[in-house]
Amino acid sequence: KAKAVFGELGILSPEECDARAEVMYESYVMQLGIEVQTLISMVESGIMPACMKDMRNYEAFPELSGPREDVYKGIMVETEKLKDLMKRVPSGLELQATYLCEVVKCQMVVVREMVDRAEGLIEKELYPYPTYETMLYTHHSEAVVPATQDVEFASSEIQEYFRELGIEVPERLSGGAQMEWMYQKYVDMMVGEVNVLADIALNSVLPACAGQAVGGLRAFDEVLGAELRQLAACMEGRPKEVVAEAKYICEVVKPQLCVLRDLIEAAPPSTWAATPGDHHRVTRSTQ
């Protein structure tokens, strides 16, 4: 009926209808296949190890384990059934789509229900993924507090950076306000360094070194351009929260910045003939 209607209205021919159906079948088969493999991977690499560790807590008092053993074994059994069903997928896109929808998807629901039961039994610290409670309610009742490693990060990396540059934290600030000021100041200064070197690379070094061999690199400008694009990609991936952004800049952006700086410093002296001030800016940035 659909083919007839589309044909009468001059929208799609029967062949075009078949082609669109084939594309939709293929997309459904691929997407559901990915979901099945993801589910199996999450269960086998995350849920089952957590179940095993949780059961060890009850070795001395097995009577306190309740339904844990049955639920955990049930997850393993139902997951094996799902894997077995995936081995029996028929050939042909339409048959595959139908089989995945009517058979495999139903078994996925069974596995998911067993895992949901386990979520309420496994010790909180052992559960490998965010729970429903965490996702739904935590952000309503808990303030965002920097983790211990974040505080240590600020104490070591940022304070050392400030000491090297002779920057002092305002005395009027203390505690959390001081830490936030340090994070934001570090982010602002590093972003400034990135902008300076990117500007020099784009407007001074690349035009001057186009097509030249520098430091054993035949296509120096191409290498420099590639590293510049990589730095831009790193900057685009920055988190928005200031603590995470500071850590990201230190651990991801800063190493790439050093690579770009080393390349710029390898540029021949003739590069700076027209813009000697840029060479001074690079030297200051390096220091």
Image: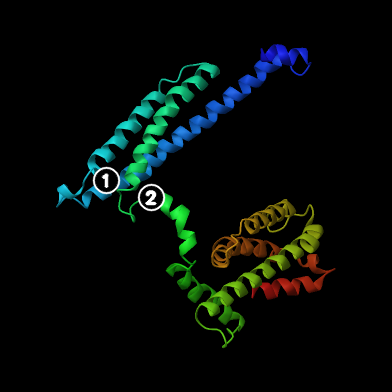
Is 16 located above or below residue 279 in the figure?
above
Front position in the image: 204 or 272: 204
Measure the alpha-carbon separation of dots 2 and 1. 12 Å
> Amino acid under label 1?
Met
Front position in the image: 265 or 247: 247
Considering the image in quadrants, where does the C terminus appear?
A: bottom right
Q: Is residue 13 visible?
A: no
Q: Residue 158, percent across and down?
A: 54, 74
Q: Is residue 200 left or right of residue 108?
A: right
Q: Residue at x 15, y 51 (%)?
A: 61
Q: Which residue is identified by label 1? A: 52
Q: Which residue is identified by label 2? A: 128
Q: Is residue 243 visible?
A: yes
Q: Residue at x 68, y 57 (%)?
A: 232
- The disc placed on residue 73 is none
Of callouts 2 and 1, the N-terminal one: 1
Q: Residue at x 35, y 51 (%)?
A: 127
Q: Is residue 203 left or right of residue 139?
A: right
Is 96 located above or below residue 32 in the figure?
above
Q: Are marks 2 and 1 in contact (CB under 8 Å)?
A: no
Is 231 located above or below residue 49 in the figure?
below
Characterize the local packing of mark 2: few (<14), some (14-19) or many (20 or more) Cα atoms within 10 angstroms. some
* SS at mark 1 in the image: helix
